[in-house]
Amino acid sequence: MTTVTDITTNWIGFLFIAIIVIIVISLFFRFVPVGLWVTAYFSGVKVSIGTLVGMRLRRVAPQDIIRPLIKATKAGLDIDINELEAHYLAGGDINQVIDALIAAQRANIDLVFKQAAAIDLAGRNVFEAVQVSVNPKVIETPVIAAMAMNGIEVKARAKVTVRANIERLVGGAGEETIIARVGEGIVTTVGSAAKHTDVLENPDSISKMVLKKGLDSGTAFEILSIDIADIDVGRNIGASLQMEQAQADKNIAQAKAEERRSMAIAQEQEMIAEVQKMRARVVEAEAEVPLALAEAFRSGNIGVMDYYNMKNINADTKMRNSISGSTERESDE
């Protein structure tokens, strides 16, 4: 006879088995994406369950491979699933590559998966490149200032219409190089003009000159046209440079004049110092005259009459000098 204990034990065993079955089924559906396989099968993508499980083991999300593959298959593209997985593992964007291949196919552009994958891994937007190849893109340059030969500044802004070159997307220069080269061409063309009015009257001369230089060589684009969107007259740089040069010459002349003035003052001070030294020597010599006279009186070399005769001669000399000085002043007057 079955007891309550046996019934309880049976229910616990049944519950334990049910939990194990649920866990096993969850793990099965976790590693075996049956729903994705069914979607792929009815979408015309032939992929095995083992391939999907292998993706799980290689840490690849199967939906990231299968869904782009379904899109490519519906578009009529023949792409190997191994190539998609390899590109995914390399860090590429599979959806972008598939979209680019579909767009290229619709536009009759010769683009294969390996080339699109290489462009994507090179860091470029391959889908945008295909769009630009079909629908050319307009790149607008900043305002570029250049000076004509007559010294007048000319400011120009250009619009460059480019088309992507699929074959040069890997290793080719980007938009920055195009803008830099166009700017260099504008500066060269304006700088070679004799007058700024020549450029203002014929702005298309800039476009023709720049296009002749082959600025798209080595870039990922093909330049279709260069149009001058805006052109204006700037400063008179030649006159400004001449004014700055004149001011610099003036400053140099003032500096040299100040230098000569300083040298003249220094020479004058030296002459004054020399005169003062000579006067000091004269004063010293005059101070020795009384001593020499006293010594001559004591030694008897000069008498009193000789002394008075010398004084008379000195007085007569001073009178003659004063008379001659007054005469010169009267003649000058």
Image: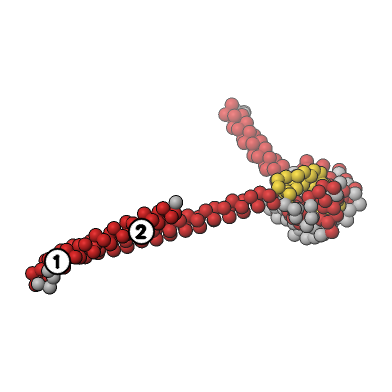
Mark 2 element type:
helix
Q: Residues within 10 Å of mark 1 (few under 14, many from 20)?
A: few
Residue at the image point whose x is 28% and y is 59% from the top: 318
Residue to which mark 1 is pinned: 305
Q: Nearer the viewer, residue 195 or 281?
A: 281
- Outermost residue, top direction? 4
Q: Position of residue 143 (x, y in %)?
A: 73, 45
Who's the residue at 75% across and 59% down the image? 171
In this rendering, the answer to whether 13 lies above or below 288 is above
Marks 2 and 1, how far apart at CA: 28 Å
Instruction: Say which amino acid is labelled 2.
Output: Ser
Q: Amino acid at mark 1?
A: Met
Residue 49 in sight here: no
Quadrant including the N terminus:
top right
287 or 320: nearer the viewer: 320
Q: Is residue 275 above or below residue 201?
A: below
Give the left or right position of residue 171, taking residue 297 as reference: right
Give the residue number, with chain letter if any, for mark 2.
324
**Residues under numbered marks 2 and 1 in contact, where contact means CB atoms less than 8 Å apart:** no
Residue 225, image x, y percentages: 86, 51
Measured as percent of width and height from the top left, residue 300 is found at 9, 72
Image point (23%, 64%), residue name: 313
**Helix, strand, or loop for circle 1?**
helix
Q: Residue at x 75, y 48 (%)?
A: 154
